[in-house]
Image (cartoon, grey):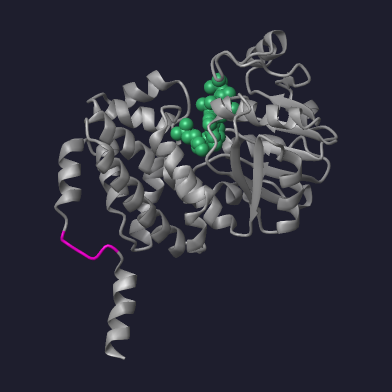
């Protein structure tokens, strides 16, 4: 059994800490607020983030980063991506041994367009880690904390290290696969949040299942287009961290991105919506990053671009839908049509 530090005591950090505790590991859960750590230790609940869920008494919460990471073999980073750099900087000051660093956060940094593992590697010298691993997939914390069947994927540059993390987390409720495509796994998890905002907007506008299916399918096409341009393997987007996570986030009312989109579709203002949520809505920052990336990479992303206009340029969602529906007509799969054309000409 391993000593594990989970950094980030929101819904996902707490749910992952519970999986690890169920597996018999010694789990320390770090919160950046002392009173939050005290509340978890006193009540064995995390009411704001996982309402009604009983947390195993073996999980010890703390606000003291240094004591939390002392002597651990694994550190699991689960803070919102906007806090990732700052937490890594603090972590470097208290680390004195080599660990396996896993992160389970989903986003892209808007200013640098970096994936989370790139941010971590930039901030933490490599003498402190065996490798940086990502854990991603269709996994709402609310369901994981109820031990409902869930599947995720872990990936790292060194697949052997990813397998160690697979062993750490896997159990009969939480099935963990491995993938060699770190870039694809991280991008699928980050970019699906943009489309989930769109699915929420569509539902908020009162559109139906046809529109949602269109958003998921055409959304996946543009995620794969950008992902492939950034070095991912296109096959990854047909897996758990691609279409799997896209389905769960676009169709579940657990999703904060879907819920925020839903309120926007009903005509609420972005600032107000984010304030009311009180939880992280990663898709907003990621839309900014992906919109800019699509321009830099010269990749067409009409849905992302439409959501950018709604979030940051005050566009009316109905006008954006109209704009998407009346784009110039085209083939569904340009690549496929090109191959067929070539075969006809042979
Ligand atoms: N929830 C889910 O089902 C899943 C979430 N994820 C990803 O996990 C990541 C974390 O999300 P999640 O746990 O859901 O978020 P939540 O909104 O549930 O919780 C966020 C937590 O981070 C804390 N926090 C905020 N700012 C900082 C900071 N500067 N330093 C340290 N901690 C901070 C918050 O503390 P405070 O209470 O003080 O605000 C809170 O404890 C996101 O990237 C998300 O996309 C991935 C898969 C599933
Ligand atoms: O990533 C998630 C499920 O896999 C959680 O999505 P939300 O952040 O939209 O709640």
Q: Quadrant of residue 335?
A: bottom left
Residue 264 x, y percent position in the rendering:
28, 29
Name the foreground residue: 15 vs 229: 15
Residue 346 lies within the magenta run: no
Q: How many marks?
A: 0
Where, quadrant-wise, is the C terminus in this rendering? bottom left
Name the foreground residue: 129 vs 247: 247
- Residue with the most extreme top position: 42
Please tell me whether residue 183 is drawn above or below residue 343 in the rendered image: above
Residue in the image at 31% along x and 29% along y: 262
- Residue with the most extreme bottom position: 346
Ligand 1 position by quadrant: top right
Is 297 displayed left or right of 341 in the figure? right
Residue 277 x, y percent position in the rendering:
41, 22
Is 311 displayed left or right of 81 in the figure? left
Bounds of the magenta segment: 328-332
Name the foreground residue: 236 vs 295: 236
């Amino acid at each position: 059994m391993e000593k594990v530090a989970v950094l980030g005591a929101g819904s996902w950090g707490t749910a992952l800490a519970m999986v690890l505790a169920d597996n018999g590991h010694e789990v320390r859960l770090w919160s950046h607020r002392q009173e939050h750590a005290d509340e978890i230790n006193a009540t064995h609940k995390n009411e704001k983030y996982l309402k009604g869920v009983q947390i195993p008494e073996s999980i010890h919460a703390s606000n003291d980063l240094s004591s939390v990471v002392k002597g651990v073999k694994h550190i699991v980073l689960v803070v919102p991506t906007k806090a990732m750099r700052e937490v890594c900087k603090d972590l470097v000051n208290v680390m004195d041994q080599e660990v396996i660093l896993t992160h389970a956060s989903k986003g892209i940094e808007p200013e640098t367009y970096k994936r989370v593992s790139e941010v971590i590697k930039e901030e933490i010298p490599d003498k402190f880690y065996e490798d940086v691993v990502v854990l991603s997939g269709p996994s709402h914390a609310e369901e994981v904390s109820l031990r409902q069947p869930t599947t995720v994927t872990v990936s790292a540059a060194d697949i052997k290290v990813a397998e160690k993390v697979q062993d750490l987390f896997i159990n009969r409720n939480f099935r963990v696969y491995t993938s060699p495509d770190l870039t694809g796994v991280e991008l699928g998890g980050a970019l699906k949040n943009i489309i989930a905002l769109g699915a929420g907007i569509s539902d908020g506008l009162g559109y139906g299942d046809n529109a949602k299916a269109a958003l998921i399918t055409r959304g996946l096409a543009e995620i794969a287009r950008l992902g492939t341009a950034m070095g991912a393997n296109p096959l990854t987007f047909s897996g758990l961290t691609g279409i799997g996570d896209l389905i769960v986030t676009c169709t579940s009312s657990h999703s904060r991105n879907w819920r925020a989109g839903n309120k926007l579709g009903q005509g609420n203002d972005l600032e107000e919506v984010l304030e009311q949520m009180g939880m992280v809505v990663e898709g907003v920052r990621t839309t900014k990053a992906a919109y800019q990336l699509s321009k830099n990479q010269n990749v067409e992303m009409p849905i992302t671009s439409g959501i950018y206009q709604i979030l940051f340029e005050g566009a009316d969602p109905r006008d954006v839908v109209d704009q998407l529906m009346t784009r110039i007509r085209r083939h569904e799969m340009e690549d496929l049509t090109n191959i067929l054309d070539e075969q006809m000409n042979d």
